[in-house]
Amino acid sequence: MSDLVLAIDVGGTKIAAGVVDGDGSLLRSAIRPTPADDAEHAWAQVRSAVDEVLAGTPSVRGVGIGCAGPIDTARGTVSPINIGGWRHFPLRARVADLVPGVPVQLAGDGVCTALGEHWRGAGQSSRYLLGMVVSTGVGGGLVLDGRAYGGRTGNAGHIGHLVVEPDGEPCTCGGRGCVETVASGPRMVRWARERGWQAPAGADAAVLADAARSGDAVAAAAFERGGHAVGLMIAAVAAVCDLDLVVVGGGVAQAGPLLFDPVRRALDVHAGLSYLADLRVVPAELGGEAGLIGAAALLRP
């Protein structure tokens, strides 16, 4: 029997498909942009990426799908916030039609990111970890006692929507003051611009980080504020789930100490429970491959 797995990772900005072997190595992959509007256009991008990576692949033993949420693992449907055309979209059934006769597993993209880092990345030494991405949004997933934890509906781990500012800015989820409104790249850039940071049109978190390293006080304050919010969130999740490790990836995390230093300072203040004394926060290792490798891990025994 083939040990190859078809992995699919559907996010708000890109759709990826790949073939992963039994050791967790990504053998080939294809990426498409994520359309935000039409349901069938988005599905066509998934199908195109799948067709590309399966061309020349003799067979796969199963399919793992990670998708931005909310999702419904019982029904196999997805309703990603950033893909307006997909509401209760039957993604699992659609994919099963493409690859008949093999099991198809669906999980949140944050869970898959955590699983990928747990299997092949920075989380291999941990059995209780939060894997998270700080990028255009803030997302995450939990691995508890060595296994993915999706909760009742598959949506456990939506850490980007923990409230850190009760009277804060409105969030795309419908709430206010979520960590995503403070620490995501676009929100950090907007906050800095509103306070006088001068930057070219289209500037992103990488440009903001360069400005902070060059001594721009407003840019540095944006990272301090965002890192503090992430630290508050980590302290809360770690206390509830008894974690020993947090793995942080994504574009904003590429700023390194600009983000991680205020995270750790916040933890020094707010993660005071004795069982959190050994909690570690480390950079992710797999980059953009984590979601695909983690989606394949859904098929592991």
Image (tube, helix red, strand yellow):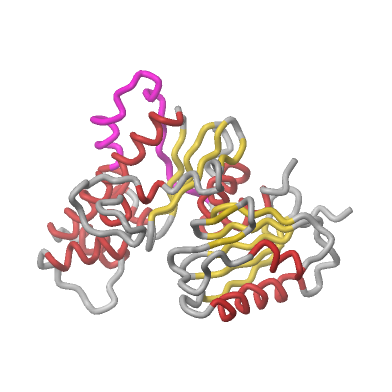
Residue stretch rendered in magenta on the structure: 263-285
Q: Nearer the viewer, residue 224 or 147?
A: 147
- Image quadrant containing the C terminus: top right
Residue depicted at 15% across the width and 58% down the height: 215
Q: Is residue 283 magenta?
A: yes
- Tell which residue pokes out farthest to the right in this image: 1
Q: Residue at x 21, y 50 (%)?
A: 225
Please state the horizontal and vertical placement of residue 124, each as a whole percent of the image.
Answer: 58, 38
**Residue found 52% across the figure and 67% down from its top:** 87
* Residue 181, quarter of picture: bottom left
Q: Is 120 on the left-hand or right-hand side of 130?
A: right
Furthest residue in direction left, as rendered = 196
Looking at the picture, how far across and down is residue 205, in whole percent? 30, 64
Report the label total.
Answer: 0
Say whether residue 284 is left or right of residue 173.
right
Q: Quadrant of residue 55?
A: bottom right
34 or 71, which is in the foreground? 71
The extreme top residue here reads 274
Q: Residue at x 63, y 65 (%)?
A: 90
Q: Position of residue 113 (x, y in %)?
A: 54, 51
Q: Reply yes or no: does residue 217 show up in magenta.
A: no
Looking at the picture, does residue 291 appear above or below residue 53? above
Tell me which corner region of the image, top left, top right, bottom left or bottom right, holds residue 41.
bottom right
- Give the image location of residue 142, x and y in percent: 51, 41
Q: Nearer the viewer, residue 250 or 61?
A: 61
190 left or right of 75 in image:
left
- Vertical position of residue 164 compared to residue 194: above or below: above
